[in-house]
Image: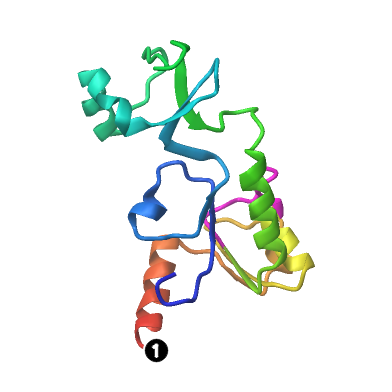
Amino acid sequence: QRRGYIETIITQNVDGLHQRAGSEQVIEVHDSLRTVRCMDCYSVYDSRSLLPARPSWQDEYRQGLYRYGVECRCPACKGFLRPDVVLFGESLPEKALAKAMQVSKHADFFVVLGSSLTVSPANYFPSWAVQNGAKVLIINNEPTHLDDKAAWVIHEPIGKVLNEILERVNQL
């Protein structure tokens, strides 16, 4: 993004690593562990702001451990708080889905990194890009259903391929 080659990142990751790496235009379609949401009043809080309320969470948070059954109460209504992420069977957040759809349909170039493209609706994003004229690059260890429609397909480990791409970009 800093060099202007990437405009927007659409991710299913919930760990916030894109932002920690400096990415700015990031659409998190599965939301983020950086926030928690009350199951009763739907208030949303920064996860880190609640750490002082329960000292043991500091260690759990640093280790990335979010265990079922850890009691956390909403400061507003005392309802239970849960990680603000999409759990199995839940719908994607409407705003993130709409934005990802819009970005996909208006992309000139779309890169798929490490996805089997089997989970919907996220697997539709590159399909929408192709249907609207974008060139698609798929980098994944295994074949996907979209390989035949992609302009380029690389079946190699992502880390290896991205390191090679970075070396070439650095030569520009």
Q: Position of residue 103 (x, y in %)?
A: 65, 61
| Residue underneath mark 1 | 172
Q: Is residue 7 left or right of residue 21?
A: right
Q: Position of residue 1 (x, y in %)?
A: 44, 69
- The region drawn magenta spans 112-124
Residue visible at 49% across and 31% down? 84
**Residue that extends furthest to the right in the rendered view of this protein:** 131
Residue visible at 21% across and 27% down? 59
Crowd tier of the residue under label 1, counting other residues whose Cα lies within 10 Å: few below 14, some 14–19, many 20 or above: few
Q: Dot 1 lies on which element?
A: loop
Q: Is residue 161 above or below residue 45?
A: below
**Residue that extends furthest to the front in the rendered view of this protein:** 76
Residue visible at 55% across and 15% down? 40
Q: Position of residue 63 (x, y in %)?
A: 26, 33
Q: Is residue 139 above or below residue 68?
A: below
User: Visible in this render: residue 119?
Assistant: no
Q: Position of residue 2 (x, y in %)?
A: 40, 72
Can you say which quadrant of the picture contains the C terminus?
Answer: bottom left
Three-letter amino acid code at the position of disc 1: Leu
Residue nearer the viewer, 151 or 64? 64
